[in-house]
Amino acid sequence: MEYSDKNSVAPGQITPSNLGVNGLLTVIGAGPGDVELITLKAIKALQIADVVLYDALVNDVLLEYAPNAEKIFVGKRRGCYAYQQEQINELIVNRARMRKHVVRLKGGDPFVFGRGAEEMEHAAAQGITVAMVPGISSSLSVPAAQHIPVTKRGAAESFWVITGTTKEHKLSGDIALAAKSNATVVILMGMSKLAQIVSLFKKEGKSETPIAIIQNGTRENEKIGIATIGTIEEEVENRQLANPAIIIIGEVVKHRENIIKIAQEQELVGASITDY
């Protein structure tokens, strides 16, 4: 069956009555990690879920919003997959065809390197009604929570959000293009390729460009390292930074230092800035 408007539901129309003959799949963005950064619409959809398939980056506390649902972990931890993508697709189809409301709960926003679009296409092709509730993307919110804007007048007029590792497990070619620009560069899933990323920026004469790496952004165990392209690898080693982490490169990183300096001068550090 081909996808059509008859197989889709607008977010405001997600109710048990929308199940249809073959059930309903709702793809939901859980936000960057802080449980308070999920949307009200997402919580309402979870409350009427029959099944929740959730990823590793989803805060487990959010599962409490679906007290009556079957909960299945389908994420990846330390390179080990609970389910391969094909198996996740089959779980979605099998549960939905039992006339159930299946929620696919993903970290950040499911349409930003989250395979949410692929899963919706697969379900719709099987005659399953689909809906999507956007989430707060970690690519913007994690830097913001540490007082790093992706754009700032006089510092950056645009930004790139790039996956560090392609499906072929190679470094994205877009990073080399981004390194030539004056834009802010936000790289997800790039820690394993950090040396290559640094090398590309050095080739463009950007050894002094500020860079931030934020691990476990917005969570209680958040860690951050601030350096330059030329010194970041040493900073990563000193702070023991690792995945899951987001890399932010550009002059906007200096905004955090400016805020800290102003807060210190005003004696407002404890009230206005997140400590390391």
Image (cartoon, rainbow, N blue to C red):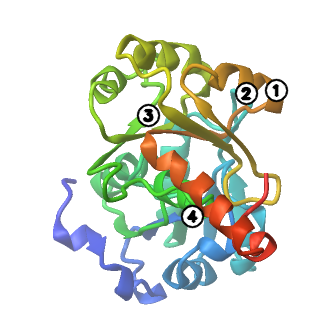
Q: CA distance from mark 4 to mark 1?
A: 29 Å
Alpha-carbon span between mark 1 and mark 3: 25 Å
Q: Which residue is mark 1?
A: 238
Task: Name the residue nearer the viewer: 116 or 91.
Answer: 116
Q: Amino acid at mark 1?
A: Asn
Q: Secondary structure at mark 1?
A: helix
Characterize the local packing of mark 3: few (<14), some (14-19) or many (20 or more) Cα atoms within 10 angstroms.
Answer: some
Instruction: Name the residue type under label 4.
Output: Gly
Instruction: Check disc 3 and give the amino acid type.
Output: Thr
Q: If you read the primary sequence from the N terminus, does the residue marked by circle 4 or circle 1 appear first?
A: 4
Mark toward the viewer: 4 or 2 = 2
The answer to whether residue 45 is above or below residue 251 is below
Q: Amino acid at mark 2?
A: Glu
In the rendered image, the residue lying farthest to the front is 265
Residue 235 — which label?
Answer: 2
Q: Is residue 107 visible?
A: no
Of callouts 4 and 2, the N-terminal one: 4
Q: Position of residue 69 (x, y in %)?
A: 69, 73
Query: Do labels 2 and 1 touch, CB within 8 Å?
Result: yes
Q: Secondary structure at mark 2?
A: helix
Q: Which residue is mark 4?
A: 31
The residue at which mark 3 appears reads as: 163
Whether residue 53 is visible here, answered yes or no, is yes
Local packing at callout 1 (Cα closer than 10 Å; few below 14, some 14-19, many 20+) is few
- The alpha-carbon separation of the residues under discs 2 and 1 comes to 5 Å
Q: Identify which residue, 21 or 9, lies in the foreground.
A: 9
Where 256 sits versus 234, above or below? below
Q: Quadrant of residue 23?
A: bottom left
Q: Mark 3 or mark 1, which is nearer the start of the sequence?
A: 3
